[in-house]
Structure formats: structure tokens, C-alpha cells
């Protein structure tokens, strides 16, 4: 069984921030005063913090370690300008994405209230170390631990030649309580007829359009038997981390779908990484959606996002406006639209689609869903390597030209290509990226611990695919972190 590597913590204070270094992570948490620093230190030594009953769970800042000298510089310059210190950013004190065992045990007893769907494509061959599989492991586990009111459904997209067999990945998902739906894209033949060499990544994102078909069809009876709504569901990408209970206002207008804005450019566009979906709309308009996609040969720059943004406009040539007017609900209410002329509704991105390049705003609720939008894990790890060799452009990465500075870091090329040029890094972005990356790695370490236990279950036993006692794995994981901290003292 693969064991979780112990993490050795060395706690010190630099510029009002706590720094932990050693085997795997660096921790930056609020320490503007000595009292806050002491509280944060105690929290870190406990391995995780209990979040308050009324608020979402947020995590202690963690990042991979480099050197003590370098880490001190990182903390002091986390405000992204040499004239600032870390305390400018540290008013926000995140807590652990991995809850204490008692809280995890209580959460597992909670009855789900809403179905949550995410899609990914089954890769060929041995894929246990593929990065997008790791993203999905962290996404699913964070949701199970921090928002058990969601009923997670993984749509596992298969090519025609692939059989619907279980694998190590699906066994892990099943073990933590995720319903795995083996599926083939319903309109794959149409896509291939227009674009024979469509990359699997795009097919995985286009799978979102099949979610409503499944909810209204083969999964409908199952959802109803679980008392889950079948009129609206949550759909996300697989590169999100859930930090707290995800709920939506029942009064949220939802004629089509709701999402947060992309956050750049002069034209308002939705980011479909987190969507609240009106199932009836997608089913009623499914034929027209496919016609629109086929008319564009399914060539959309940002996959399903570009497709849906282009489709849900008032001047849609496929007659969207007339169908909405004739739906019985009357004309689309401009007051509830994301903007005039758009036919989708707005979610608050600061809550439902947090981006690490935007540090949480003062006097606002921190995100309950974080999204690796734009810069990804590989980008951050490349920056970390540049920091280790004192080649990171501290004080230059903020503002509208920050992307160009980051792109110039030797060996680092933004994974998003030219579109990444539109993203502006906030003054505290590096601190936020460090925390989010650290929590991603902790979540993956816990996922590997669980996955190993599932794979080592005796053949033919139900334990191999039954829901594991997550709180027991959490207790073991946090105890190992705590023991690592004690060994470092």
C-alpha cells in the first residue's frame, strides 16, 4: 500500500506571515499580529482547522518547499510589489480543505440535495498518472468532503472501441461515493462527420451537452429515487476544488443556465467551468444546439464555453428567442440576464467560480468553488522552480502586462496560449496560487491513500468498490501530517 509521505514542518515568521517548509509544503497564513501567528501555528500543527458551522471550509496556505532564504523572500513579496509585505494580503486566513475527522464523519451522514455532474474522457492504456485524472481525483474528493449535500456523478466518456470496464480510477470514485456513469457521446457520429480528427479533450468538454439528456432519460428514475431535483443540476469542469457547502438560491432565475463571467475582455462572456443548468432548456433545444455546432463544424475556440456563449444570444439564428417566448414563461426577462442581449444568468464568480489570480476581496465571502481557470498547476510549479533559482520577476507580475512578464520566465509557457494574455494577476495572486496548489497536493495525497486501500481489498469482496469510511482515512492522513510536524521540532 502506498503510504502518504510525511510532511516536516518548520514554523517561522517573516514579514508577518508563517512559513512552513520541509518535505513538501510551505504554509502562508495570516499573521499580521503575534496572536494570529500563534493561532495559525497551532492550527498547522493540528494538521487542519475546523471550519465554522455557518461558513465554508477554507484551507491553510500550503506550497511546495524550496529553501528557507527563498521562502522568506516569497512571503515578503507575496503582495507582488517590492514595496509591500505579506501582511497586505494576509487579512484572508484560509483553512484546510481536509476537514477534521469528526466533521468528515458527520458530513458523510448528510443527505444529498442536488446532483453534481462532471465529465471526462477515458484515456487509452495505462493512465494512472495522467494529470487530468489527478485533477478529477482532487475535484471529486474535495466535493465529497466539503459539500456532501451534492450527489456527484462522473460521466466517463468512452470511445466506440473502448469497453465499459471498471479501472483503478473508477474504483476510487465509487469508493468515495461518486456515481460513475459509463457513457458514449450521443452525438459523436455527427461530430466525426464534420470533424473526423476531433481531439478527445474537446469531446470531453462537449459531454456537458449530454448531461441534460441523461438527467431527463436514463438517470431520471435514479435521481428521483434519491429525491434529487431533475429540473436543475450543477455541472463543473474537473479542475475545480470545493471548499464548502455549495447551495444556490432557489429564487435564482434559470430560464437557460447560470454561470460566472469569464472576467476579461470588452464583451461579457460566461465561464462554463461552473454552471447551474436548466435541464428542460437543454433538452428542448438539444437539436438546435447540435445544428448550431454542426454549422460551425464543432470548431469552437474554448470548446463548450464558446459554443454555449455563441448560442445563447438574443440574435441566435436558430430561433432561440422565439422558442423562449413560446415556452409558456413569456419573453426572456432582461432584468435577470447576465447583460442585455444575453440569454444566460449570472453567478457571482467571487463565490462560485473563484480564480487564484484574483485574491479574495475584502469583506466578501471567500469562494466555495475554486477553479484553475487560465493558469494551471503546471504553470505554478514552473514559477516555483524559477523562484528556487531566484529567476522569478517579483514585483512585475501584477496589472495588465503581468502575463507577458510571466510568459518571459525561462522555461515557463502559459498553458492557455494567447488567450491567457487577457488575465490580470491581482497583487496577492502568488500567495493564493501557493495555497491552492498546496491544497491540491494534499487532496491528491489523501486520494492516493484511499485508492491504495481500495486496490488492496481482497478480490471478490464488496469492500473494493464500497464506500470507504472517509473520516477514517482523513484521521490517518492528518495524524501522519501531525507526526511529521512533531519530528521536525
Image: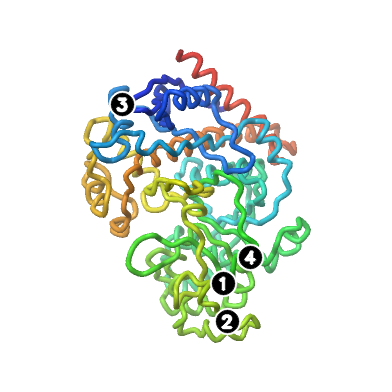
Q: Earlier in the sequence, mark 3 or mark 1?
A: 3
Q: Is residue 381 visible?
A: yes
C-beta proximity under 8 Å, tags 2 and 1: yes
Q: Is residue 461 left or right of residue 170?
A: right
Q: How many marks?
A: 4
Which residue of the protein is positioned furthest toward the right in this rendering?
A: 225
- According to the picture, the residue beneath numbered tag 2 turns out to be 324
Residue that mark 3 sits on = 72
Q: Kindly identify which residue carries mark 4.
A: 251
Task: Between label 2 and label 4, give the one nearer the viewer.
Answer: 4
**How dense is the environment of label 1, judged by Cα within 10 Å: few (below 14), some, or many (20 and up)?**
many
The answer to the question of whether label 3 and label 1 lie on touching residues, with beta carbons closer than 8 A, is: no
Rendered location of residue 11, percent (x, y): 42, 20
Q: Secondary structure at mark 2?
A: helix
Q: Residues within 10 Å of mark 4 (few under 14, many from 20)?
A: few
Q: Residues within 10 Å of mark 3 (few under 14, many from 20)?
A: some
Residue 256 shows which numbered tag?
Answer: 1
Q: Residue at x 32, y 22 (%)?
A: 68
Decide: is 180 above or below 199.
Answer: above
Instruction: Estimate the spatial distance between the alpha carbons at disc 4 and disc 1, rounded to whole Å.
Output: 14 Å
Amino acid at each position: 500500500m502506498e503510504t502518504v509521505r510525511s510532511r516536516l514542518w518548520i514554523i517561522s515568521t517573516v514579514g508577518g506571515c508563517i512559513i512552513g517548509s520541509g518535505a513538501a509544503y510551505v504554509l502562508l497564513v495570516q499573521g499580521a499580529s503575534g496572536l494570529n501567528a500563534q493561532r495559525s501555528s497551532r492550527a498547522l500543527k493540528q494538521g487542519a482547522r475546523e471550519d465554522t458551522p455557518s461558513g465554508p471550509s477554507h484551507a491553510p496556505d500550503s506550497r511546495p518547499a524550496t529553501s528557507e532564504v527563498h521562502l522568506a523572500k516569497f512571503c515578503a513579496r507575496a503582495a507582488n510589489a517590492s514595496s509591500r509585505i505579506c501582511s497586505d494580503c494576509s487579512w484572508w486566513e484560509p483553512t484546510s480543505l481536509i476537514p477534521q475527522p469528526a466533521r468528515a464523519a458527520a458530513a458523510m451522514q448528510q443527505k444529498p440535495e442536488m446532483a453534481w455532474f462532471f465529465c471526462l474522457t477515458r484515456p487509452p492504456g495505462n493512465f494512472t498518472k495522467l494529470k487530468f485524472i489527478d485533477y478529477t481525483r482532487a475535484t471529486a474528493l474535495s466535493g465529497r468532503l466539503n459539500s456532501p449535500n451534492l450527489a456527484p456523478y462522473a460521466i466517463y466518456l468512452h470511445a466506440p472501441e473502448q469497453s465499459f470496464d471498471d479501472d483503478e480510477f473508477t474504483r476510487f470514485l465509487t469508493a468515495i461515493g461518486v456515481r460513475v456513469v459509463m457513457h458514449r457521446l450521443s452525438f459523436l457520429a455527427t461530430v466525426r462527420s464534420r470533424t473526423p480528427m476531433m481531439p478527445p479533450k474537446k469531446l470531453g468538454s462537449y459531454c456537458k451537452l449530454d448531461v441534460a439528456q441523461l438527467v431527463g432519460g436514463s438517470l431520471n428514475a435514479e435521481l428521483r429515487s434519491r429525491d434529487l431535483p431533475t429540473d436543475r443540476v450543477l455541472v463543473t469542469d474537473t479542475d475545480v476544488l470545493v471548499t464548502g457547502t455549495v447551495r444556490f438560491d432557489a429564487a435564482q432565475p434559470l430560464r437557460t443556465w447560470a454561470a460566472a463571467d469569464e472576467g476579461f475582455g470588452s464583451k461579457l462572456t460566461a465561464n462554463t467551468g461552473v454552471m447551474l443548468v436548466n435541464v428542460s432548456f437543454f433538452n428542448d433545444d438539444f437539436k438546435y444546439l447540435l445544428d448550431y455546432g454542426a454549422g460551425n463544424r464543432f470548431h469552437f475556440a474554448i470548446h463548450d464555453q464558446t459554443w454555449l456563449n455563441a448560442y445563447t444570444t438574443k440574435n441566435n439564428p436558430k430561433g432561440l428567442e422565439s422558442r423562449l417566448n413560446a415556452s409558456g414563461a413569456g419573453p426572456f426577462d432582461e432584468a435577470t440576464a447576465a447583460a442585455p442581449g444575453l440569454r444566460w444568468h449570472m453567478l457571482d464568480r467571487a463565490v462560485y467560480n473563484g480564480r487564484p489570480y484574483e485574491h479574495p476581496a475584502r469583506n466578501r465571502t471567500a469562494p466555495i468553488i475554486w477553479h484553475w481557470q487560465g493558469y494551471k498547476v503546471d504553470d505554478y510549479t514552473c514559477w516555483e522552480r524559477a523562484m528556487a533559482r531566484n529567476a522569478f520577476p517579483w514585483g512585475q507580475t501584477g496589472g495588465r502586462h503581468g502575463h507577458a512578464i510571466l510568459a518571459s520566465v525561462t522555461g515557463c509557457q502559459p498553458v492557455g496560449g494567447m488567450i491567457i494574455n487577457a488575465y490580470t494577476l491581482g497583487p496577492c495572486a502568488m500567495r493564493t496560487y501557493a495555497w491552492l496548489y498546496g491544497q491540491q497536493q494534499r487532496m491528491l495525497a489523501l486520494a492516493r491513500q484511499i485508492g491504495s486501500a481500495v486496490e488492496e481489498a481482497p478480490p471478490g469482496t464488496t469492500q473494493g468498490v464500497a464506500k470507504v469510511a472517509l473520516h477514517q482515512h482523513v484521521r490517518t492522513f492528518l495524524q501522519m501530517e501531525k507526526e511529521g510536524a512533531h519530528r521536525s521540532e
